[in-house]
Image: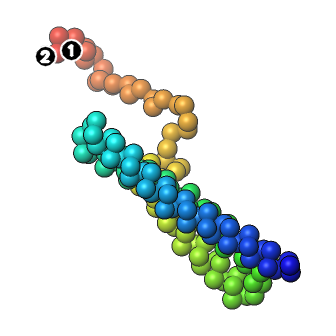
Amino acid sequence: MHSYEGMEWVVTGFEVAGVAILAIGSLLALGSAAATLRHSDPRTAYKRARQDVGRVILLGLEVLIIADIVLTITVDRTLESALTLGLIVLVRTFLSFSLEIELEGSLPWRRDPAGSKPAETIETRPAGEAADVEGR
């Protein structure tokens, strides 16, 4: 077997794994959401389905990017394939970034570090004004 043929099999393996992650993971995520629907309200089930399917898409895209990189650096070493790879990685990175924002609800650099609690708000009053203890 020629080394290019071996690498084509590796690429095919990554592509099959990426598609399997997308297909099987999506089915499992939807099944999990259906189970949640039985025990909870539809809004919770919908939110869970979106988050789980989004995570599956992120993982599947990462594996498919690996396949594209391996293909470009080992099998098809041309300027055209490198430019195509760059475009594919750019589009998939944008999709991954967009999905992550959708799942997490904020930009990555605007999130609190893991394990930190938000700072407590300190109430300020004009000088000489006492706090209203009785709620008046």
* Mark 2 and mark 1 residues within 8 Å of each other at the beta carbon: yes
Check disc 1: other Cα within 10 Å, few if <14, some if 14-19, many if 20+: few
* The image quarter in which residue 77 lies: bottom right
Identify the residue position indicated by label 2 in the image: 136
Residue 87 picture location, percent across and down: 59, 78
Quadrant in which the N terminus is drawn? bottom right
Report the Cα–Cα distance between label 2 and label 1. Answer: 6 Å
Nearer the observer, 72 or 122: 72
Going by the numbered disc 1, the residue's amino acid type is Asp
Q: Position of residue 64 (x, y in %)?
A: 61, 67
Q: Is mark 1 on a helix, strand or loop?
A: loop
Instruction: Return the residue at label 1.
Output: 132
User: Is residue 119 depicted above or below 25 in this figure?
Assistant: above
Q: Residue at x 55, y 66 (%)?
A: 19
Asked whether residue 113 is in view, the answer is yes
| Residue 2 image position (x, y, % from top left) | 86, 81
Q: Is residue 113 above or below residue 28?
A: above
| Residue at (28% x, 36% y) in the render | 39
